[in-house]
Amino acid sequence: MKRNILTLTLALLLLAALLVGCAKPAPAAPTGEQPASTGETAGTDTAAPADTQAPEDPVDIEALYEAGMAKIKGEQGDELVLLPETDPEFVESLFPGLTSIDMAQYKLALSPVTNGPVEVDIVEVKNKADVQKVIDIFQARVDSLSEDTGYPENAAAWKNNSRITSRGNLVILAVLTDYYGELPAEFILD
């Protein structure tokens, strides 16, 4: 008898949990922002002030990266494989100062060979004033690797094939060896 009561109790608890999980979420609390007007109201000016600028559409950098990578093929038709890097200490060792910048999102994809001249780094900063800081950090990496006397072929590729571009709050550093051809348009922002 005790086993039946326990089984019935557990079944009721499971049913209650399912019902709670299926319930509609509560409406979001108001944030203090007024909803955008969809129609004209008599006697009011609905135009935005001239000194304001509409925010840019958000960029899905993962989709941008995947689209660009899909277009890169080697001379034999092989695809380029890059390794994502997210460890803050390692990122800081490669890009000194980058981890101190407030980033909205980033994708750092590095060559499997240390400092190899194939790399795609995409950073979106939260503050427009930080764009130049990211450009400078990327340029310091390019300058350093283009002077690597231990691997002159790699240094030449870093010097001649790397490109840093920006648009809005987005900055891209991309470098490819001649084996992979030209950079795809997805990795060139200007």
Image: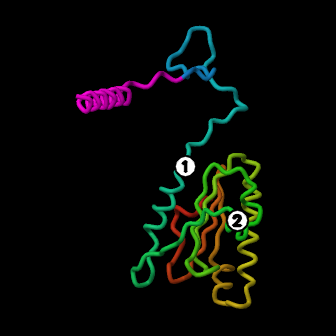
Which amino acid type is shown beneath numbered disc 1? Val
Q: Is residue 14 above or below residue 87?
A: above
Q: Which element carries disc 2, helix, strand or loop?
A: helix
Query: Quick check: is 65 in the magenta stretch?
Result: no
What residue do we see at 71% from left, 91% from top? 150
Q: Depth check: 29 or 129 in front?
A: 29
The residue that mark 1 highlights is: 59
Task: Measuring from the top left, give residue 185's x and y in whole percent.
Answer: 52, 64
What residue do we see at 73% from left, 60% from top? 98
Q: Depth check: 31 or 34 in front?
A: 31
Task: Measuring from the top left, give residue 124's x and y in whole percent.
Answer: 64, 53
Is label 2 or label 1 in front? 2
Q: Which element carries disc 1, helix, strand or loop?
A: loop
Q: Is residue 114 above or below residue 29?
A: below
Classed neighbour count for the residue bearing mark 1: other residues with Cα under 10 Å, few (<14), some (14–19), many (≥20): few
Magenta residues, as a range? Answer: 1-28
The residue that mark 2 highlights is: 89
Q: Depth check: 102 or 56 in front?
A: 102
Query: Quick check: is 19 in the magenta stretch?
Result: yes
Q: Mainly helix, strand or loop, the magenta region? A: helix
Task: Measuring from the top left, give residue 137's x and y in whole percent.
Answer: 75, 65
Classed neighbour count for the residue bearing mark 2: other residues with Cα under 10 Å, few (<14), some (14–19), many (≥20): few
Sequence-wise, the earlier of marks 2 and 1 is: 1
Q: Is residue 84 above or below residue 149?
A: above
The image quarter containing residue 4 is top left
Which amino acid type is shown beneath numbered disc 2? Glu
Picture quarter with the C terminus: bottom right
Q: Is residue 24 above or below residue 110?
A: above
